[in-house]
Amino acid sequence: MSENNLLIVDDEPNVISALKRVFIDDPYGVYSANSALEGMEILKGNRIKVIISDEKMPEITGSEFLSMVRRDYPDIIRIMLTGHASIEAAMKAINEGEIYRFFLKPWNELELRFAVRSAFEKYDLEGENKRLLSVIKKQATDLKLIEEQYPGITKVRHDKEGRIVLPTVPDEEMEQIVSKYEKNLE
């Protein structure tokens, strides 16, 4: 199965079929649910990156569903699709579900495909940003530990022309520094 998984939630089977046809040539794993509760069950067992949800569904509306998704799976990119456009529905979806895009039925196939592709890219970029932030935090912690053990070691010195000047450390002392640092990492 693809690592780019899309979940379509709509209480109308013909809408689900039509949306599946829209993405038939795209490299996505496409899951579908006929209700918000069924959609939540699919989320429990699958790595979904993007959701397209209808607004008007029995029991739980699309806005309520996307709000639950935002709470339980905040990284998933959420798209609202509705045939009953109202300012109130749009505002509720935006404010409660923090949706990425809002589409009206009937949808423009090209625009929807582009939005879903962009949503997958957004998901991946946000994941990469989190990973890099984690690396930066780890490196900052490492530098702080080194600086605590060897005050001044992380200070950058410049000569009169602005070039960085590296301090000279005898080989034996450098080996001790490296050995001590490696022990702290364990």
Image: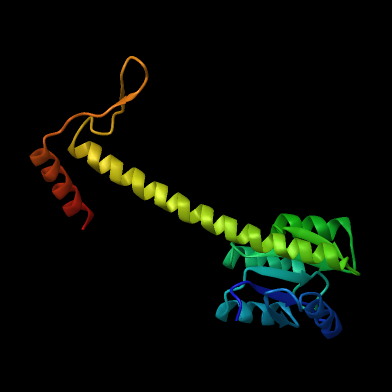
Q: In the figure, is residue 177 to the left or right of 41?
A: left
Q: How is the image coloured?
A: rainbow
The C terminus: image quadrant: bottom left
Residue drawn at 61 percent across, 61 percent down:
123
Residue drawn at 69 percent across, 61 percent down:
119
Which quadrant of the structure image shows residue 157?
top left
Q: Nearer the viewer, residue 12 or 145?
A: 145
Q: Is 147 rendered above or below residue 157? A: below
The N terminus: image quadrant: bottom right
Residue 127 x, y percent position in the rendering:
54, 59
Farthest-out residue, left: 172
Q: Is 124 rendered above or below residue 139? A: below
Which quadrant of the structure image shows residue 156?
top left
The tally of labels here is 0
Q: Nearer the viewer, residue 26 or 18?
A: 26
Q: In the figure, is residue 113 to the left or right of 73?
A: right
Residue 15 x, y percent position in the rendering:
84, 79
Residue 160 x, y percent position in the rendering:
33, 14
Farthest-out residue, top: 160
Residue drawn at 35 percent across, 46 percent down:
139
Q: In the figure, is residue 69 to the left or right of 91?
A: left
Q: In the figure, is residue 129 to the left or right of 105?
A: left
Farthest-out residue, bottom: 13
Residue drawn at 67 percent across, 68 percent down:
50
Residue 182 x, y percent position in the rendering:
19, 52
